[in-house]
Image (spheres, rainbow, N blue to C red):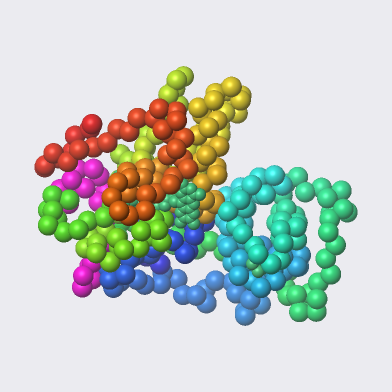
Amino acid sequence: MKAGQAAIKKGLAVSAAVTAVLDAGAAPCVTLVEKVEQHPSELEHDGMNPVAHCLAMNNGSQCGYCSVGFVMNMSEFITNNPKATKKEIEDAFDGNLCRCTGYRSIMTGMKTFASDWSAADEANRMKCLADGQSASQLPGTVEIPFPKAARGRAQPVQATGDRQAWVTPLSLAELASLMQANRDKTLRLVHGNTSFGIYTTEYPTTRMFVDIRLIPELGGRAVIGKDELVIGAGNTYNDLLELTGAELQRRGPSATALVAIHYMARRTAGRIVRNAASLGGNTMLVLKHIAGNEDPFPSDLFTTLVAVGAVIEYVKRTWPSFSVA
Ligand SMILES: Cc1cc2nc3c(=O)[nH]c(=O)nc-3n(C[C@H](O)[C@H](O)[C@H](O)COP(=O)(O)OP(=O)(O)OC[C@H]3O[C@@H](n4cnc5c(N)ncnc54)[C@H](O)[C@@H]3O)c2cc1C
Ligand code: FES
């Protein structure tokens, strides 16, 4: 979808349940970029998505409630990490829950894609007898679908509905003038929008959603010096994990504060949320709900940031521009 492009910086799995294409009231212009029939489909007998096929062949789906999430997460993960090991594949599923099949059969199927899946693993694996219907499915030889239209740089989205509007500024300066021009409206900055399901009452009253994902000044900064880590608010949890993970491998386990940050970021949500959720969004959820009668937001990462003495640098609205504080 054209509108959905703004939700994607690169091809990453995100949770469909929490990723807004556009919020209600501001989406009169959602159009399909490609026709559905242009994609390989089971009905045309071009073959199943190989991950879905593998899940079926390994009896990894019982009621099917969780299966879409497992297939979606793995399809993206293995496309972007074709040399992933068994351990990396297992780690990629830390946020996917299944309540009825059980993880052994699901994980066995997924790990057959691993670069270190060995003959011994194959010999010792849980045996699976395909039933008549699943055995008749075409083998998973098709390329995992990833629409061309969803690749490349995300495009800004502007949309106006009866009550709400969605705008996408492309720089801090543009954000400043936009906020100034709309001072009389209830505005909401939106990054990953994963708070959509948490403070639901804040959405209907919003008149203008300001999508800040394409503002380069928010995302660019991520530097680890000898004694400090500086990271922009627009970085996601997975950006932070990649940065700290690489640094920890270089330094070894002695850097305590960095280990703590990495550990708690890793324990936040699951991979498909961490692909979208930003550090700025998480911080603001805590700060905006810290006082008052409503529920405070109990952030895991923020607790660690307080413990390690993190400092927030923020921009102040000093119309007509912003200044750093
Ligand atoms: C399924 C699920 C599981 C989760 N599990 C955990 C968990 O285990 N532990 C945990 O701590 N959290 C958890 N969360 C919460 C998640 O970490 C936060 O929702 C997320 O970090 C918010 O980031 P975002 O980019 O999506 O923010 P958004 O939802 O886009 O915004 C959140 C708030 O911050 C403001 N904002 C966003 N960016 C900025 C900015 N740059 N400057 C100023 N204001 C800004 C917005 O206006 C809004 O008020 C979970 C969320 C989901 C959906
Ligand atoms: S198959 Fe039922 S929840 Fe996983």
The quadrant the C terminus occupies is: top left
Towards the viewer: 240 or 63: 63
Q: Residue furthest top?
A: 226
Q: Residue furthest front?
A: 293
Towards the viewer: 31 or 273: 273
Percent position of residue 281, x then y: 36, 47
Residue found 43% across the figure and 47% down from its top? 298
Vertical comparison of 130 with 279: above or below: below
Towards the viewer: 226 or 138: 226
Residue found 66% across the figure and 49% down from its top? 89
Towards the viewer: 290 or 276: 290
Judged left or right of residue 209, residue 72 is right
Judged left or right of residue 129, residue 322 is left
Percent position of residue 134, x then y: 75, 75
Residue 212 can be seen, yes or no: no
The magenta segment is: 158-178
Residue found 60% across the figure and 57% down from its top? 96
The quadrant the N terminus occupies is: bottom left
Which quadrant of the view contains residue 185? Answer: bottom left
Q: Is-magenta flag for residue 172?
A: yes
Percent position of residue 52, x then y: 66, 66
Q: Is-magenta flag for residue 276?
A: no
Judged left or right of residue 30, residue 276 is right
Residue 149 can be seen, yes or no: yes
Percent position of residue 100, x then y: 69, 67
Tally of numbered tags: 0
Residue found 75% across the figure and 68% down from its top? 59
